[in-house]
Image (spheres, coloured by chain):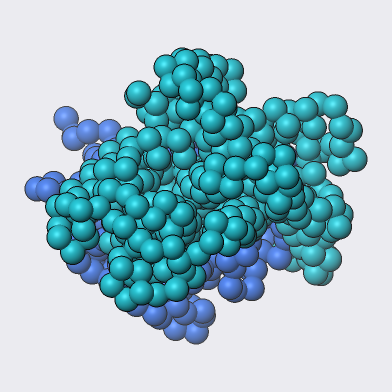
Chain colours: A blue, B cyan
């Protein structure tokens, strides 16, 4: 159980597992505003890639494009070698690509158990995780509660459990840590690391660097929709260009 | 594409603040590595499934009773009714309203789409059946099927309206029903000028029997929807479309299917009404009060419950017969007051009282699951606004 597996070099790529998710040259604009331009990445099983950048740099748009919420304007997304570009969410879900939302979106009128049951029946693939998602996130005693009555932190966990109930191969995590207390953050970081160990590929959007450090293997730094840095988080925070976009220009 | 690595790995990032995580004794973290995983999912999945399908965690026979009771009660009610009140025309109309109320239940109760122009589908069914009889001299049963098919087809044409939400959908269906009305009222092939006049294709007794069968089937359909994964998907769509899609629900197909079922019920009701009435004008067919009654009956009884809309139709339509026919003004007063009381104190309808009483006074063997989340007691969040929308009289 290593904390950070490190950046795999070229030799491990060729001999190791193939990429489960390959996104290349994604772009998305809203009217004249280019939200994402030329973003690409690969993700292998059991690997976590962080997507960082200032507010409005297009992190969530990348997730929305990959998860089928938005149609991409260009580029492609391959899931397990299969072209899934522009595929609607519900089909991606069945193929094993799931996401969580920045603001948790449980089905508020349904009970916690129903939230899970909705997904359970649809599952096609074998669970990589191997345990009940609800007990995995620690919500199993809440199964009869209406999802809308949970606290926001609990709703985030429910969102995660719901994503896991679909037995994802790839999980897109959109600011799961935002608004959580330090203890909750530690808990969520532990959960995400367990998911990596189970062989699930993670794409993590997050502002909290301390949290990212616990979870991701490498990061892509976005600025104004374009990747400006790829590498480990440690390298990223030492990179002048990255420091500049986060803290402002040099004097 | 991906500039993986700059040649050097970083396998040994110092465990700054996370040494404790590495040695965490939390069994959940270790679970994926262990063989105990084979045991855990079965047990837990069963619990999840039980919790969702049967909020009370009842054994199988009890869940079957829960399913059969609404169907049997409906059937018994309409079979006994002719013995108590010998007016088949009234009872048939009541059954027709019960079908319409169940149709509203399917689309409004489970998806939250308020079909204010529901009368359009009712009228489509009526004219579908009537025109089939007039032109092709089909038998009564074929005419009923024809009405249902016409209504279903029109609902398919209208299905893009489901992209709208809330009041917009309600108004759009209203506009659609008005469009249908003006077409039917003005075209010569629909006998817009002279009005429909049909030969008697079914006897009064036959019509009542068929109406009772259709009411019973519509209750069975709602029971199925209530307890099935299809119904769960519908309620998920009502709660949050995007989130439901992310959970693997095919939102467009699922809600269109519900709309189709609802329209077919309206078409059958309209066709029954046409065959029963035998002489009518477009004006009396596409009468907006049909929509309003169907919606109010459904809400009064309680949507999402199988029996609620039937009770709503029986109680309120009887009231209408008792007061409304002789003293229409008094009836409107009583009706208006009822709706106000309903909106203020009973947004979940009559069935919510039953649910409340049961939750309150009957002990739950599985109290753990029988708490706030008990699904049939849920009131759709927007019932109040919808009643308000449905009542501009």
* Place of residue A28 in the rendered image (x, y in percent of width and height, measured from the top left): 21, 56
Quadrant where the image shows the N terminus of chain B: bottom left
Can residue B18 be seen here? The reply is: no
* Place of residue A53 in the rendered image (x, y in percent of width and height, measured from the top left): 31, 44
At 38% across and 35% down in the image, what residue appears?
A: B289
* Place of residue B264 in the rendered image (x, y in percent of width and height, measured from the top left): 45, 60
Quadrant where the image shows the C terminus of chain B: top left
* Place of residue B326 in the rendered image (x, y in percent of width and height, measured from the top left): 48, 23
Left or right for A182, reference A102 = right
Q: Most extreme residue toward the left, as rendered?
A: A32
Left or right for B92, reference B127 = right
At 29% across and 56% down in the image, what residue appears?
A: B196
- The one nearer the camera, B2 or A181, is A181
Left or right for A65, reference B352 = left
Q: Quadrant of residue B211?
A: bottom right
- The one nearer the camera, A173 or B177, is B177
Q: Quadrant of residue B365?
A: top right
- The one nearer the camera, B368 or B310, is B310
At 26% across and 43% down in the image, what residue appears?
A: B283
- The one nearer the camera, B299 or A69, is B299
């Amino acid at each position: 159980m290593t904390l950070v597996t490190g950046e795999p070099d070229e030799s491990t790529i060729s001999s190791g597992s193939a990429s489960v998710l390959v996104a290349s040259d994604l772009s998305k604009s809203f009217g004249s505003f280019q939200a994402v331009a030329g973003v690409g990445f690969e993700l292998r099983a059991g690997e976590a890639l962080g997507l960082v950048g200032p507010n409005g740099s297009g992190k969530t748009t990348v997730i929305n494009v990959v998860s089928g919420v938005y149609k991409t304007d260009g580029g492609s997304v391959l899931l397990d070698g299969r072209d899934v570009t522009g595929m609607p969410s519900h089909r991606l879900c069945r193929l094993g690509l799931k996401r969580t939302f920045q603001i948790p979106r449980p089905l508020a009128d349904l009970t916690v158990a129903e939230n899970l049951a909705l997904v359970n029946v649809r599952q096609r693939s074998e669970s990589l995780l191997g345990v009940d998602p609800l007990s995995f996130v620690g919500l199993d005693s809440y199964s009869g509660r209406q999802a809308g009555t949970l606290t926001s932190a609990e709703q985030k966990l429910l969102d995660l459990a719901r994503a896991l109930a679909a037995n994802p191969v790839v999980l897109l995590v959109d600011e799961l840590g935002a608004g959580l207390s330090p203890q909750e953050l530690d808990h969520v970081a532990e959960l995400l690391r367990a998911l990596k160990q189970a062989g699930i590929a993670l794409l993590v959007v997050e502002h909290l660097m301390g949290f990212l450090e616990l979870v991701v293997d490498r990061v892509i730094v976005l600025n104004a929709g374009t990747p400006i840095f790829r590498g480990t988080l440690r390298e990223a925070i030492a990179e002048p260009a990255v420091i500049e976009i986060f803290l402002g220009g040099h004097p | 594409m991906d500039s993986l690595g700059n040649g050097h790995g970083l396998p040994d990032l110092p465990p700054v603040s996370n040494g404790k995580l590495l040695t965490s004794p939390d069994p959940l973290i270790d679970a994926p590595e262990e063989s105990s995983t084979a045991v855990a999912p079965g047990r837990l999945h069963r619990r999840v499934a039980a919790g969702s399908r049967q909020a009370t965690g009842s054994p199988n026979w009890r869940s079957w009773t829960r399913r059969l009771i609404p169907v049997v009660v409906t059937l018994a009610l309409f079979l006994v009714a002719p013995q108590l009140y010998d007016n088949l025309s009234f009872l048939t109309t009541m059954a027709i309203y019960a079908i319409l109320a169940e149709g509203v239940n399917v689309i409004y109760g489970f998806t939250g789409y308020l079909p204010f122009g529901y009368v359009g589908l009712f009228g489509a069914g009526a004219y579908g059946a009537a025109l089939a009889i007039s032109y092709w001299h089909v038998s009564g049963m074929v005419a009923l099927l024809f009405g249902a098919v016409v209504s279903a087809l029109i609902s398919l044409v209208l299905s893009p309206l489901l992209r709208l939400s809330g009041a917009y959908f309600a108004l759009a269906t209203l506009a659609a029903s008005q469009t249908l009305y003006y077409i039917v009222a003005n075209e010569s092939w629909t006998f817009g000028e002279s009005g429909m006049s049909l030969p008697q294709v079914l006897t009064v007794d036959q019509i009542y029997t068929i109406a009772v069968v259709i009411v019973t089937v519509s209750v069975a359909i709602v029971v199925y929807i209530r307890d099935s994964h299809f119904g769960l998907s519908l309620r998920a769509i009502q709660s949050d479309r995007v989130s439901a899609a992310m959970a693997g629900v095919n939102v467009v197909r699922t809600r269109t299917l519900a709309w189709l079922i609802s329209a077919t019920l309206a078409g059958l009701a309209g066709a029954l009404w046409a065959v029963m009435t035998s002489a009518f004008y477009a004006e009396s067919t596409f009468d907006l009060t049909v929509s309003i009654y169907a919606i109010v009956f459904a809400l009064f009884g309680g949507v999402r419950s199988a029996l609620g809309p039937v009770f709503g139709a029986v109680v309120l339509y009887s009231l209408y017969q008792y007061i409304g026919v002789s003293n229409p003004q008094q009836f409107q007063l009583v009706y208006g007051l009822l709706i106000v009381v309903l909106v203020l104190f009973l947004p979940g309808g009559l069935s919510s009282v039953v649910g409340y009483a049961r939750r309150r006074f009957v002990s739950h063997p599985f109290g753990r699951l029988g708490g706030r989340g008990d699904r049939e007691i849920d009131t759709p969040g927007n019932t109040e606004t919808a009643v308000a929308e449905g009542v501009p009289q």
